[in-house]
């Protein structure tokens, strides 16, 4: 069978000696004129393949839009506990951030709910609050808490996708309510802090958060130390 020759021909231009003084065109400009290439074959004849400048633009991968939800309060099971005539106590920004970080940790570990163990991790992740500093001074780390949480709850199912806001367990909700109640009992106008939140976790004796804290060395003496600190009038989160 006879072979057929396929070749390309294109118009060429000669570069002048003063080419450095000529302004170079932008290769990505929509007005760029590109030479039309021809492919010639005795079967196909002459076929023109125009090249458009849009085809030469760099490929930009599509990025996924990330949505974040910001809340300025924490859920409570009994909002009626606050007298309508009184000023409701507010959560500190660090307390709210710790809770949000706890939800994120629950999602990272692919837990279906946000438990007291997740709140404990969130307090450590926030890192700048008084409760976190107390925990780290007594040997707590995020890695250790994660390991203990997996031991208690089990290894995550890697094919499970946690919801954006994993619902609170009953113990976690009680820990939040405990923190609010303690602030109301104090009669102080200050904020509910991460220290209140940590003591709320410690108050739930049957929950994973308490068991992890006890395993890693937290005790009633440290809890009393923290309680004495937050009971001082005018205590604020530093």
Image: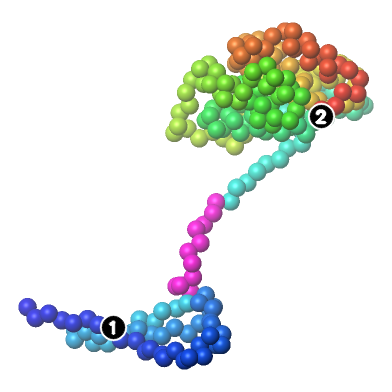
Q: Is residue 61 left or right of residue 44?
A: right
The residue at the point 12 percent across, 80 percent down is 3
On the image, the x and y values in percent for residue 42 come to 19, 86
Rendered image quadrant of residue 48: bottom left
* Residue 60 painted magenta: yes
Q: Is residue 113 left or right of residue 185?
A: left
Q: What kind of secondary structure does the magenta stretch mostly adopt?
A: loop
The magenta stretch spans which residues? Answer: 54-64
Front residue of 67 and 202: 202
* Residue 192 painted magenta: no
| Mark nearer the N terminus (1 vs 2) | 1
The residue at the point 44 percent across, 33 percent down is 159
On the image, the x and y values in percent for residue 9 come to 30, 86
Rendered image quadrant of residue 36: bottom left
Rendered image quadrant of residue 195: top right
Q: Which residue is mark 2?
A: 238
Q: Is residue 48 left or right of residue 127?
A: left
Front residue of 225 and 91: 225
Q: Eyeballing the image, is 141 above or below 7?
A: above
**Residue 78 can be seen in this image:** no
Front residue of 223 and 141: 141
> In the rendering, which numbered label is found on residue 8?
1
| Callout 1 crowding tier (Cα within 10 Å): few <14, some 14–19, many ≥20 | few
């Amino acid at each position: 069978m006879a072979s057929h020759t396929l070749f390309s021909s294109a118009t060429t231009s000669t570069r002048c000696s003063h080419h450095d003084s000529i302004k170079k065109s932008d290769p990505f400009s929509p007005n760029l004129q590109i030479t039309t290439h021809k492919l010639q074959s005795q079967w196909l004849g002459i076929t023109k393949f125009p090249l458009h400048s849009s085809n030469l633009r760099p490929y930009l991968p599509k990025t996924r839009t990330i949505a974040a939800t910001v809340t300025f309060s924490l859920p409570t099971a009994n909002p009626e506990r606050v007298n309508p005539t009184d000023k409701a106590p507010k959560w500190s920004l660090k307390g709210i951030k710790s809770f949000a970080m706890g939800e994120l940790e629950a999602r990272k570990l692919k837990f279906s709910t946000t438990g007291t163990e997740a709140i404990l991790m969130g307090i450590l992740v926030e890192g700048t609050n008084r409760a976190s500093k107390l925990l780290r001074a007594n040997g707590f780390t995020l890695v250790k808490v994660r390991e203990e949480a997996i031991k208690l709850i089990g290894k995550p199912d890697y094919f499970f996708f946690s919801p954006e806001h994993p619902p609170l367990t009953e113990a976690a909700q009680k820990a939040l309510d405990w923190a609010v109640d303690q602030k109301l009992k104090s009669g102080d106008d200050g904020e509910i802090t991460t220290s209140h939140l940590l003591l709320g976790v410690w108050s739930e004796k049957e929950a994973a958060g308490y068991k992890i804290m006890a395993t890693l060395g937290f005790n009633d003496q440290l809890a009393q130390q923290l309680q004495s600190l937050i009971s001082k009038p005018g205590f604020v989160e530093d």
